[in-house]
Image: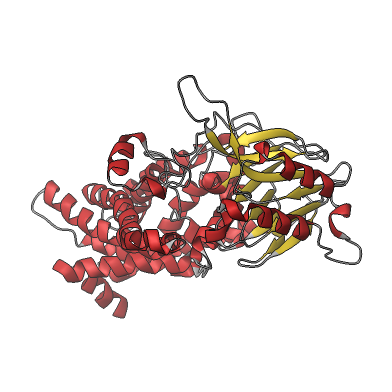
Amino acid sequence: MRIAVLADSVILAWGWRRRLIALAAGASGALALPPLDLWPLIVLPMTIAVWLIDGAVGTSMTRRFRAAAVVGWWWGFGFFLAGLWWLGAAFLVEADKFAWAMPLGVVALPAFLAVFPALAFGCARLLWPSGAGRILMLAIVLSLSEWLRGHVLTGFPWNVYGMMLAGQGQIAQFASIAGLYGLTLVAIAIGAAPATLGTGETGADRWRAPVLGLIALAGLIGFGAWRVAPGPEPLVAGVKLRLMQPNLAQDAKFSARNGEAILNQYLALSDRATSPTTPGVQAVTHLIWPESAFPFLLGRTPQALSRIAALLPPNTTLITGAARAGEALPGESRPPIFNSIQVVDDEGTIVSSYDKVHLVPFGEYLPAVLETLIRSLGLSEFVSVPGGFASGQRRLPLSIRGLPTATPLICYEVIFPGDVAPPGLRAGFMLNLTNDGWFGQTSGPYQHFAQARLRAIEEGLPLIRVANTGISAVTDGYGRIIASLPLGTEGVLDSGLPRVGPATVYARLGDGLYVALLACFLLMSRLLPRR
């Protein structure tokens, strides 16, 4: 059969042909990610991954590990290169300074991230059973490598393999009980299941894995359909939100000389009438601006606070991203600067703040172990604030007048599963302010928004997301979009706030069910018949 011929061509490939097959297979996985969301194509990278490991032969365990790890690296490099190519757009914001480094930035991160699937492929080969059990073994080790990728060093769980199925709304609901890593475990198994159609299995053994994969897929879709069947969530009474998306050009956004013009745009846009019944900001209870809204310190710019107070009607609150200066430590010449969310009342007083805890390495701070080297090479200008942002101490719910308590998340803090709020401090919604303007009209902002929606599903919390260039949106605790503004547009979005529902299984147990599924998969991999 044709699929057997295809399997043999992968298994028996050697040298650079084998590596190029791995590279292309990994890259095909990006087609299942946002914005395309062609989720059925998950079968391409995962099925070919099984065949690549099948063909990793050697006369010793070390050689088998090395053979599998090499193709695993090329497979992972293809996946991350195709899924993260948009990072290069950030180097073109100030092209005269940084364009030279774009190839390094676009290639270096995927090359490093590919180490994780390389280790997974190598370990899988050492534990490789025959028959359908190897499908489950791949799912176990590859999902564990993704968990490690999300936690090692500062963690970078962007485009975890489960996101290839998260674009299907019903399938994504499985994250409410097993989280992203549980979804990843099942997604890999489903994607790899057709591999047995092309190898040595016969009769029932040949079809067992694909049939079980289809049953699992149908089960996920059925569970998701049941979970969202009750319909839209009711709204919190008396809350009228206005999300402001200025769509500022990134190269102008952080220039101090543009400060007054930027504030003028914000004030005018925030007071824009969106309908005859919504005459500007007068009908709004909460006005929300994006991350890093100003090229100045809001708390030290009283004239800006005065103009904001003049805009806000009585009892209307502004929630905005802004840099905040702390108190200088003894012996320090400059105060620490935080990337913050600040809450401003109708008198222009900053009444509460949240300081970003999980900073972006190289974007917001220089890792201590590399700071001396990077500065000696003259590359410290890659950090947006000289000396970097300081990290907040911990994430606590943010109290905002007239709203349920909020879990504040700035930019990529929203991509970390299970790190939305400390245990026992469940909030009423997630507040995610971000600036994806660095990445233009690429895949990056779509992927970022998809991960924010999955956090809403995991935690069962409504999401308010305000982005400089988009995508700004309000979703309910099922990840369903209530209202949104598309990428690359200027505008305001008026919406209510969905009520919070009961805590999900994942919100209560974290990765507990994922661990249980790992144990079940390991047991099944040993019990399934072998050829």
Taking the image as shown, residue 261 lies to the left or right of residue 241, namely left
Q: Is residue 219 visible?
A: no
Q: Residue at x 86, y 66 (%)?
A: 275
Taking the image as shown, residue 130 lies to the left or right of residue 247, namely left
| Residue 394 versus residue 168 in the image, above or below | above
In the image shown, does 181 or 332 lie closer to the viewer? Answer: 332
Q: Residue at x 50, y 51 (%)?
A: 183
Quadrant of residue 486 within the rendered picture: bottom right
Q: Position of residue 214 (x, y in %)?
A: 48, 64
Q: Position of residue 138 (x, y in %)?
A: 33, 53
Q: Is residue 258 visible?
A: yes
Q: Position of residue 424 (x, y in %)?
A: 64, 28
In the image shown, does 409 or 28 lie closer to the viewer? Answer: 409
Number of marks: 0
The quadrant the C terminus occupies is: bottom left
Taking the image as shown, residue 158 lies to the left or right of residue 265, namely left
Q: Residue at x 26, y 52 (%)?
A: 118
Task: Name the residue at the right extreme.
Answer: 277
Quadrant of residue 81 within the rendered picture: bottom left
In the image shown, does 340 or 191 lie closer to the viewer? Answer: 340
Task: Name the residue at the top extreme.
Answer: 330
